[in-house]
Image: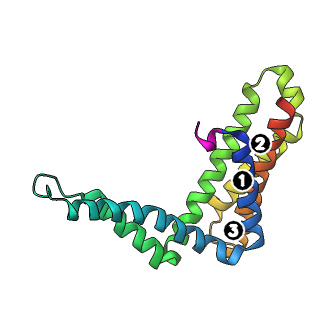
Amino acid sequence: MNAFQNPLIRIIASIAVGLLLILYPNAALPTILLIIGILIGLPSLYALLIYLLSEDRNKLPFPVLSLVMLLFGCTLMLFPGWYIGITVYVLGGALVLIGVYQILYLLTLKKNLRSKAGWLSYLLPAIVLLIGIEILVNPFSATERVMVITFGAATLLYGITDLIYYIRLK
């Protein structure tokens, strides 16, 4: 079973990421982009090296996608500031989708499970949804630090909401 299919692993990861974003907002977004660049670049570099070191190189097509992904990973690592503007929209959109998904999930629960979940379960997804909408409406009204803290708080709320679902519905 995939580790991220376990609800407790997702809850712990959400709470940990949320706390890290809140506690270290100045370093969080560039560090996340650096890690993503490494995670994209290394497999691409590996695929290119396998191709270049292969004896059947003439029979195999050149891995163009690996080259493009390697360049993308390198630009993420070398120029994270340029991607921060794009990342703000992605984070806002992700928060909107998470909030909508959690509200729809609560609405699809059977009535007796919904009463177990409690009113707090509706409040937290609504807050996540509103934070996402605020980020999308005013993406650059706040500084990068405030934006990262906001996303950290929303991620933390997501983890807490999942924890409440997990405890109450078990």
Quadrant housing residue 148: bottom right
Distance CA(mark 2)–CA(mark 3):
21 Å
Q: Residue furthest front?
A: 55
Distance CA(mark 2)–CA(mark 1):
9 Å
Pointer 2 and pointer 3: residues touching (CB < 8 Å)? no
Quadrant housing residue 145: bottom right
Q: Which residue is mark 3?
A: 148
Q: Is residue 107 left or right of residue 120?
A: left
Mark 2 closeness class: few <14, some 14–19, many ≥20 residues within 10 Å: many
User: Quick one: SS at disc 2?
Assistant: helix
The residue at the point 34 percent across, 62 percent down is 46
User: Quick one: SS at disc 3?
Assistant: helix
Quadrant occupied by the C terminus: top right
**Does 169 appear above or below 153?**
above
The residue at the point 55 percent across, 64 percent down is 87
Which dot marks residue 14?
1
Q: Position of residue 12 (x, y in %)?
A: 75, 51
Can residue 2 be found in the magenta stretch?
yes
Of 170 and 55, the residue lying toward us:
55
Prevailing secondary structure of the magenta residues:
helix
Q: Which residue is mark 2?
A: 162
Quadrant occupied by the N terminus: top right
- From which residue to which does the magenta span run? 1-5
